[in-house]
Image: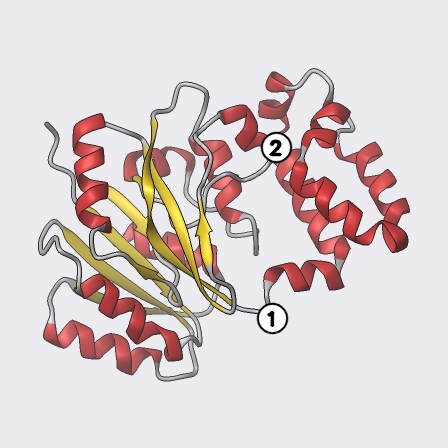
Amino acid sequence: MINNSISIIIPCFNQAQFLEETLVSVFNQSSKDRWECIIVNDGSSDNSEEIALSWTKKDKRFKYFYKENGGLSSARNFGINNAVNNIILPLDSDDVIDKELIRDVINTFNNTNADVVHYDVSFFGEKKGIYSLPNYNYKTLLLQNTFIACTPFKKERYLKIGGYDEKLKSFEDWDLWIRMLNENSKVVKISKPLYYYRKHETGSLSNSFSESPKLYFDLYDYIYTKNKAIYDAHFKNPILAYQQNESLQNFNNKIKNNFIFKVYVFVKTIFKN
């Protein structure tokens, strides 16, 4: 049995009001060893540094780094490049984890030799509920992201593909999964909510997309075009692949009265040779 260890990567940018709660959830893990927590301050102007340093002083498992602002992907890459363990768990600085997460994730990696381990999600904040993620299917993943961003994976798989795409300001995790995984990847699900995702009403990503639909379609355009060889290998009819993308279709329905022409142009151009 392989003895895996986890590096938790927490990028933070001006979210000091949530950071303490996040770090407490890491500290309260039932597994007291075989993990480290790397806090990456991505150029915050609030007191994130003060909070982070208070933890590094009282617990050597917590490590703190400051970098100039470069965005979420840049901060995650920076943190992973400074990680010493072989399993990476990205953790957002406003979310919290169940006290058994590290124990259950390490045991699952040890017992299955998985490439990725994922779990269900519990929402808190402005919206409450449990989201049960579907079982892994690579072709489905190509059509829409079926993981949360904060899903643990083997560092060696990350290194082979060069990490997160720092050009992406959203969907960076979906692009990572597309490049990291394939039909033969071993992905194991833990069927219980181990991750607690804070839902914000104001300033949410979905609100940004509704206000600027072009941003939404441009992101899909970039990901599809960048990974065109992968999509060509899995979908003989690219228009059908577009039609099967549930996320795009749901979004189209929301904005079709004002934006139908853009949808048409998108379908015509995204899979151009």
Residue at x 66%, y 19% (from the top left corner) = 235
Residue at x 29%, y 46% (from the top left corner) = 88
Q: Is residue 242 left or right of residue 162?
A: right
For label 2, the residue is: 143
Viewer-nearest residue: 122 or 228 = 122
Indicate the position of residue 189 as horizontal and vertical percent values: 34, 34
The image quadrant that residue 122 belongs to is: bottom left
Where disc 1 sits, the SS reads loop
Residue at x 36%, y 38% (from the top left corner) = 158
For label 1, the residue is: 203
Viewer-nearest residue: 269 or 159 = 269
* Residue at mark 2 to residue at mark 1: CA–CA distance: 26 Å
Looking at this view, name the residue that lies furthest to the front.
129
Say if 271 sits above or below 96 in the image: above
Indicate the position of residue 217 as horizontal and vertical percent values: 73, 47
Viewer-nearest residue: 96 or 128 = 128
Q: Is residue 209 left or right of residue 5?
A: right
Q: Looking at the figure, which quarter contains the C terminus? A: top right
Say if 224 sits above or below 66 in the image: above
The image quadrant that residue 41 belongs to is: bottom left
Indicate the position of residue 1 as horizontal and vertical percent values: 10, 27
Closer to the chain start, of discs 2 and 1, is: 2
Q: How crowded is mark 1: few (under 14 residues within 10 Å), some or many (20 or more)?
A: few
Q: In this view, does 71 lie to the left or right of 27?
A: right
Indicate the position of residue 26 as horizontal and vertical percent values: 22, 62
Q: Can residue 84 be seen in this view?
A: no
Say if 86 sits above or below 186 in the image: below
Q: Residues within 10 Å of mark 2 (few under 14, many from 20)?
A: some
Residue at x 44%, y 51% (from the top left corner) = 130
